[in-house]
Image (spheres, rainbow, N blue to C red):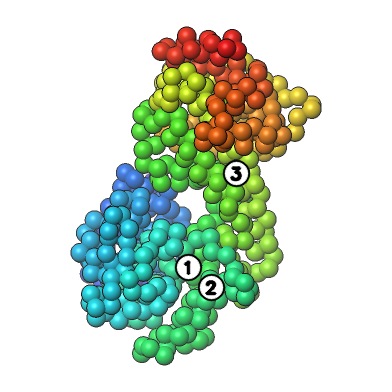
Amino acid sequence: MKNSAINRIIKLFMNCFGKLKIDYDMTYIEEMSCLVHRSMDSFSRNFHNTGHVFKLSEGLSPLETLACIFHDVAYFQVDGGFPKGMEELLLQYVLVEEQKVFIHSKSKVPNNELFCICLDIFDFKYEQELSSMGGLNEFLSALIACAKLQNLLDKKQLITIMAIIEGTRPFRPTDQHGKSCFDYLEERLIALQKKYKDTPTPKESVRIVELALNFANKDVENFAFENSAEFLGNTWALLEESNTFLQNARVYTITDYRQVLQKMESFMNFLRPETVFHRYKKTPSQRKYDNLISRATRNIQIAREYLKVKVLTIGIIEAIALETGGDAPISMFLGDFPTSTNDVLLRAEYYLPQASVSSKLTLDPDVLMLIEKGRAQDASFDIKHSPTSTYVYKKIGREGVEKAYPVMTKALLGVISTKEFLKSLDRDVVVGIAKACSKISISRQGALEKIIAGK
């Protein structure tokens, strides 16, 4: 039996300080644990929560574990601000204006050596704007870790934790000189010796970077899952976490849902496997690194096609909605999502015709399995399997999806009409989906009948 999340965090802290032979006050351990628990298990967190910490912390050293506990404690854009109780601390160093975060000018920050070191480790400057993809959350999390641990750890230990958290800034490419973010992290750690006392030696800096590299790769290990259903399950958890309106599955619109999926599809198309996992000197081994890149490449490839089918499917439904009266709550056309296994709900997919795969069509068997059988877990805003997307994919195949996708994009951007888009599609697909939706959407039945009739 597992203990509660808050008590497991307390135990992690106790184990770390025990192994480091550091005396601690249990009241303070509890205070730090409550901060982490309150921040990471809030309503807005679906992936970067304490469960993520517990998975990552297995097999780590004490300093790595402490970095792990704090590395996602700040998540500004998802949480809607700073962790509760940390506002006064963080506002000494950063300024928030219209949801943008800036580092204060040098004259406005307290004289704090650890803050200056953190700036140097992250390669940030005074008055710089911090973005979510540019290290904002990692920087805030590192500042919180230092503030909470500075009376328990020495300077080198704190620098190690800051460097490990900096290493989790994701998806950074190797530059034109062939140097990675971890090569530059090593340089910045070594350079600390010229400005501060009691900082890591070059040899110690290399070891710290190796720890940061290993943890960074572990932080994104889901990209290398052998089971793509689990990888996509995590992707859907991230979708829900970064789009809080999806957490109420009965109120968002068809367009809302399509835009969220299309944003993720665009991200997957932008993403390169070599920016997901990194290698520093000989860590990890070449064989292990090649395996990570190979599995990430396949998962990203599957995710791209899976998302493209999903976006096209909801894009067809969106076009039908726009042609019959305008955008509407998604449940008005497809029905409510089940909230328990006992729910018996009217759903559009129950009325879809059977679709067999033509020998003339090409389909990725892994993508088909994921669409038809489902991701590893449900999300509150979506079901694991995708019956309507299965119908579309079986009817038109990969080539049909590739052909229809840009036409859909033009239609939903207003370059061409939605009617033109629907007419460009396989007629059976449009009629099959429109008939299924007509069984659900009471107010649009008359207009849907016109689409079914080809008017």
Q: Nearer the viewer, residue 1 or 198?
A: 198
Looking at the image, is mark 3 or mark 2 earlier in the sequence?
Answer: 2
Looking at the image, is mark 3 or mark 1 earlier in the sequence?
Answer: 1
Which residue of the protein is positioned furthest toward the front in this rendering?
415
Residue 100 in the image: above or below residue 399: below
Report the amino acid beneath label 3.
Ala
The residue under the point 52% across, 76% down is 184
Point out residue 443 in the picture as x, y percentages from the top left corner.
41, 13
Looking at the image, is mark 2 or mark 1 earlier in the sequence?
Answer: 1
Q: Nearer the viewer, residue 366 or 24?
A: 366
Drawn side of residue 338 relative to residue 180, left or right: left
Report the amino acid beneath label 1.
Gly
* Mark 2 vs mark 1, CA separation in Å: 7 Å
Question: What label does residue 167 carry, if any?
Answer: 1
Labelled pair 2, 1 in contact (Cβ < 8 Å): yes
The residue under the point 51% across, 79% down is 186
Residue occupied by mark 3: 303
